[in-house]
Amino acid sequence: MKLTLRIWRQTGPDEPGRMTTYDVTGISPDMSFLEMLDHLNEELILAGDEPVAFDHDCREGICGACGMVINGRAHGPERTTTCQLHMRHFTDGDTIDVEPWRAAAFPVVKDLVVDRSAFDRIIGSGGYITAPTGAAPEAHATAVPKPVADTAFEHAECIGCGACVAACPNGSAMLFTSAKVVHLNVLPQGAPERESRVLDMVGAMDAEGFGGCTNTGECATACPKGIPLPSIAAMNREYLRALSKGR
Amino acid sequence: MTDYSRWTTGEPVVDTKAPEGPIAERWDRRRFEAKLVNPANRRRHTVIVVGTGLAGGAAGATLAEQGYHVVQFCYQDSPRRAHSIAAQGGINAAKNYRNDGDAVQRLFYDTVKGGDFRARESNVHRLAQVSVEIIDQCVAQGVPFAREYGGLLDTRSFGGVQVSRTFYARGQTGQQLLLGAYQALTRQIAAGTVEMHARTEMLDLIVVDGRARGIVARDLVTGRIDTYFADAVVLASGGYGNVFHLSTNAKNSNATAIWRAHRRGAYFANPCFTQIHPTCIPRSGDHQSKLTLMSESLRNDGRIWVPKVRGDERPPNAIPEEERDYYLERLYPAFGNLVPRDIASRAAKNVCDEGRGVGPGGQGVYLDFADAIARTGRAAVEEKYGNLFEMYARITAEDPYAAPMRIYPAIHYTMGGLWVDYDLQTTVPGLFAIGEANFSDHGANRLGASALMQGLADGYFVLPATLNDYLARHPHDTVDPAHPAVAEAVADTEDRLNLLLAVNGDRTPESFHRELGELLWDECGMARTETGLRKALNRIPQLRDEFWRRVRVPGSGADLNQSLEQANRIADHLELAELMCLDALHRAESCGGHFREESQTPDGEAARDDESFAYAAAWEFTGIGRAPVLHREDLVFEHVHPTQRSYA
């Protein structure tokens, strides 16, 4: 395959960026999108240019490191991570636009690399169960009904890639935050911190400069792990419940 | 022949610090004998932890909970992305919830046997004991393990065992366990007890007056090189499978932390013990950047086969039952498709070598779910393995519900690593290694679902107890930043990076990695021979020379430069690869994942030589291109009698 790539190049956080055009040839339909970029980068290195910087690691869709906006869509045309998007979903001769996540709370570090550390701080504000090592009761001491465990799991699948934020017109982190709130709040082990968790995490999310939710639903459409949109409503209910109980 | 294909033999390792007495009481005894640091004094002690996977994340969180000041590092943008996250199948624990005859003693026995009698009994027994506490800990953290309708935990079977002791969270057990550890760590970061440095890579170890006292690390965004000092350093930086270029490791996983520690005096044990996982998606072309694993749990329900005759090019569904060879069921009726990984991998290689492999290049075998779907229904298969089937379909554009998967072995895990004693301390006092970074528990072959168990055992329970003892026994003093050892480590690091940038040659770093990987896969992969290993030992120094003459690293060291990071890691791989081949050459026996063609039974199984090789090989570094020194740790088997492993 032969492709024309228009890629966002930006040398640093405070530098202006611009779209730069590259022609690539010899692309196999079996390549992943990142392998296609590897191929481009090898050519750039040999030509004496700087390769395109992008985050990536596991390349099997679970670490959440990779992510770019491809033709205007977070992670591109398929509902998966960029590393699991294969070139067979493109057509020979296509022009493809590649940009970083764009959100006020995710400043660009370089090229397609952004700073998502705000997510870590949201988790640090309450996205855990306080259970110091050694203090745990026997695992079977508390039975957890299967439907509850399944709901927890479904929300715990979030990989923290940031596609939800990138897809949202408001740059909101509601889906990310609600996934963790629901995961922990439905479990009996999460009950003691149920109220403080949702209040603190929503507070941290707002403080990081993420936008508000206007129920556009783009987040859940872009989410490679299928975190369900009603997760946001569930978090809102938890929030109101916590407010009504007082802290 | 280079000098390096020779080695010298030094003093054996006589003291592993394992306590005496009945094996079941040793861990209790060690904990009782360990000195403690007064809780009020702990915050004055700084501990560096490198890596945030299951071992590092668990250790950082636990040490901070105990009151220590932890300074932690990861090269990723967030501690949540460490490669433990990609582990799929499950975690073993001797809970015996199934009432199927499991016990601590059985998990201990299975692990020693599975490792082909090349692990240290005391350590393995402790691992089996601690396993039950891990499950309790993770459930308390909210890890959403699979459950039965009654609300209790579900388990499944894994290779090499006949009980059902593997706890799991669909095909994402590693992710869920890691997020549990990450959340515990993040709680400490928010509390200010862990100082977290993400996107920061350790590039050297600082040893002052014979003790590990800090590291040199590079901020990957600004390029800044800094020194960090501590009272102890813990390496939890994972394994070195990426030496092979194509592996199931994350693209950026690397050996730099442990290799630089080795260069500063830490012995490296059993580097040739690498694990090749039988169920990976075959490579599709030269562009391949990494390989993807399909969980071993698939072997619970999938049946592995190839056509009976070579060159059969019919599509799988057109091959009638009687013309299929379910070779694992045929060769190993007792364990069938659930034989240990090394055996399943070698069997796949053998049938492919016979010309009976399937798919492009004949480098694959079928993993067939037709029977399971017919027996339990598609929905049940989907419930257990849905995400794996989806991943397979996405990568190969084939539907595994309609036709069997194609799989082939790939490098997955490294049993070798830094040599550690019972306390998980390396030969450099104050330097500890945990998780895959050490060599400790799996011998020559790791059983499925045991990596997660070991990482969390080391991080949550073992290291926090033994580190206490080290800190209590050593003077609490500060490091003089002007000490010559500090300046030397910084200068070494800077020189090396500047050198990489200055070569300005005509080959990309990736091209060297690819070439090294192919060489190792051919000569130090699933089957090894003296001739092949000597060939590799001859070629690697040439390749290394070429690398330092011809590599091209664009850009500068003063900002985010992923080519520089990669080249620097490959430079270490080019040194470590040589030690791996030398270790494989010197160990003229077959055991576990190390299969020397010269040493096999008449029916082609690995033939161990306990007379000559019942030891762990701990190598001491003496210089690049110089003969290393071999220190043997004799393995004593008091409880599990070494036998020819039989899974038939």
Image (cartoon, coloured by chain):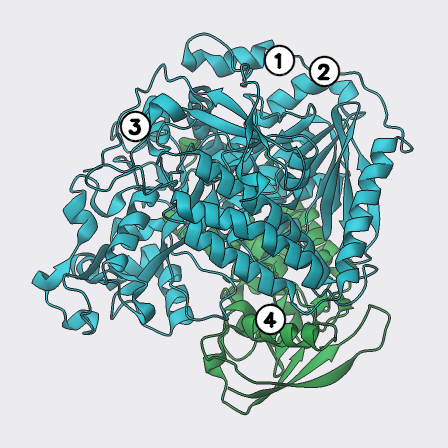
Q: Does residue A152 appear left or right of residue B604 in this picture?
A: right
* Chain B shade: cyan
Figure quadrant of residue B7: top right
Nearer to me, A107 or B216 = B216
Q: Determine the residue located farthest toward the left in the rendered image.
A: B322
- Residue furthest toward the bottom? A93
Front-most of A120 and B528?
B528
- Residue B616 location (% of width, % of height): 47, 27
Q: Amino acid at mark 4?
A: Asp
Contact between labelled residues 3 and 2, with CB atoms less than 8 Å apart = no
Q: Give residue B443's position: percent from left, percent from top.
A: 42, 32
Q: Earlier in the sequence, mark 1 or mark 2?
A: 1
Residue position marked by numbered label 3 in the rendering: B102
Vertical side of B137 occupied by B200: above or below: below
Q: Is the C-beta separation of discs 3 and 4 under 8 Å?
A: no
Q: Amino acid at mark 1?
A: Ala
Is there one chain holding both mark 1 and mark 3? yes
Q: Which residue is mark 4?
A: A38
- Which secondary structure, mark 3? loop
Residue depicted at 68% across the width and 70% down the height: B506
The hue of chain A in the figure is: green
**Residue B472 — which label?**
2
Which marked residue is nearer to the observer: mark 4 or mark 1? 4
Numbered circle sitting on residue B34: 1
Marks 2 and 3, how far apart at CA? 38 Å
Say what secondary structure mark 2 lies in: helix
In the rendered structure, are the residues bearing label 1 and label 2 in contact, judged by CB atoms less than 8 Å apart? yes
